[in-house]
Image (spheres, grey):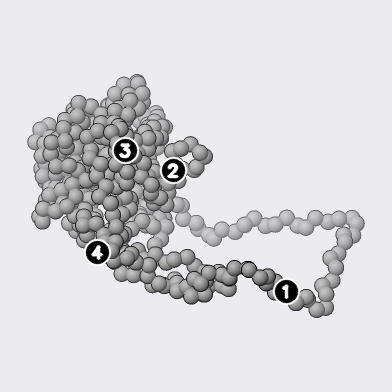
Amino acid sequence: MVFCLESEVLRRPLRSAMVHFQASEVQQLLHNKFVVILGDSIQRAVYKDLVLLLQKDSLLTVAQLKAKGELSFEQDQLVAGGQLGELHNGTQYREVRQFCSGSGHHLVRFYFLTRVYSEYLEDVLEELTYGPAPDLVIINSCLWDLSRYGRCSMESYRENLERVFIRMDQVLPDSCLLVWNMAMPLGERVTGGFLLPEASDRSPWTGATLRRDVVEGNFYSATLAGDHYFDVLDLHFHFRHAVQHRHRDGVHWDQHAHRHLSHLLLTHVADAWGVELPTRDHPPEPWIEDWPEMDHPFQPPPLPPPMSFSYPLPQPSPPPLFPPLPQDTSFYPGQPFPPQEFFSYNPIEDFSMPPNLGCGSRVNFVPGPLPPPVPGSVSHGQHRGPVVHRGMPRCVPNSPYHVPRLGGLCRRLRHSDRLIHTYKLDRRGHTHSGTWPG
């Protein structure tokens, strides 16, 4: 496995409008939570970055990203597979890792998958059924499914997606939040170790085919996950321009990309659990997704010369010597006055909850500092809406799914305006712009 960047130019950390979590905040968000991560090597890196971020504010090293099946990583433990067995790139490869914090309040487990649904996944679900109930499940499987299981791999992938979502809905408790991570974009040339040797020999063809198949597979997985009211995080959208952070094998990503992925994922999870996130001293910035730098500022093209006419055009009439005075709006009896808030509104007022509506006992997130008031004057006739200070706790239901299941196979729809980028699966012409909330 070769970890080289696609471009040798100097790379910089990804910047985002998402919350940049610190280790102490991740510890509070995942306090007394059991997190299960399932998937391929990309998901293994998701697991590693989360385990690292639970302990300290540092990034993964290149050696940690390259390591596969090691006996221990940042105080975690290899439970099964990996170096305890045989290291290989076959579809029967297994690797189970687990991290338990020293305080005993954080448990993270990883299962390596080579197919989204199989007999092995049934064994995993059996462990989750008779063991501790997970609070958060993060799952993805795509590249192995589309490249290692024959000519009808896409049809099999669609069928297995339906099976896995049905089984997850049957096995997981209502209080468990499941997030489907969509596959990240591939490079022009794909040379990952999961490819068969004969496929690697024709890598240009394989790269183009896999890129197309991944887009199609992402569409099916997101649609089916939405049909079962599971959450979907569109990593293909968020990393579509982050070319400088992808390795030359066309599949894997560097430590900056994985930290950005963790921020996106944790922000989504915090929103699903109703946890208000702390603010930072610096204003949020949009993620600069490594667009090509402009050598010179943009200049619009010159305007064409004015059109000439052979005949004189009528000229506008001269303005009056004295412009008319502005007329006041007439008042008639019974006309309602503006609301009192229009005159007495305080733009920096703190809108907190009544004391009788306490927060749930399961949420123990320390509120952050209040942001400064927005500078600038308010023009006459206009007033700002309520200023909601982030970092204040709020009441949280026991389950992220507001309506419990009533004996059906599917989870009930949660009424939540999740995140900024949403996609409605009701086929009413809404545009796709990022993250699907279940």
How far is the residue under mark 4 from the one under mark 3? 31 Å
Name the amino acid, label 1.
Gln
Q: Nearer the viewer, residue 280 or 40?
A: 280
Q: Which residue is mark 3?
A: 411
Q: Earlier in the sequence, mark 1 or mark 4?
A: 1
| Tag 2 and tag 4, C-beta contact below 8 Å | no
Q: Position of residue 86 (x, y in %)?
A: 12, 31
Find numbered disc 2 in the image and state the secondary structure of the residue it sits on. Answer: loop
Q: What kind of residue is marked 2? A: Tyr
Q: Nearer the viewer, mark 1 or mark 2?
A: 1
Give the amino acid at mark 4. Answer: Val
> In x, y percent, where is residue 23?
22, 59
Q: Which mark is residue 327?
A: 1
Q: Are marks 1 and 2 in contact (CB under 8 Å)?
A: no
- Of the image marks 2 and 3, the number of the one nearer the N terminus: 3
Q: Tell me how far mark 3 sits from mark 1, CA to CA.
A: 60 Å
Q: Residue at x 15, y 48 (%)?
A: 107
Judge the density around disc 1: few (<14), some (14-19), many (≥20) Cα neighbours within 10 Å: few
Give the class, few, some or many, for how many residues have Cα within 10 Å of label 3's Cα (few <14, many ≥20).
Answer: many
Q: Amino acid at mark 3?
A: Arg
Most extreme residue toward the bottom, as rendered? 322
How far separated are the C-alphas under marks 2 and 3?
Answer: 18 Å
Q: Nearer the viewer, mark 1 or mark 4?
A: 1
Q: Residue at the spot x=31%, y=21% of the render?
A: 150
| Residue receiving disc 2 | 423
Is residue 98 something that shows in the picture? yes
Question: Circle 4 sits on which residue?
Answer: 366
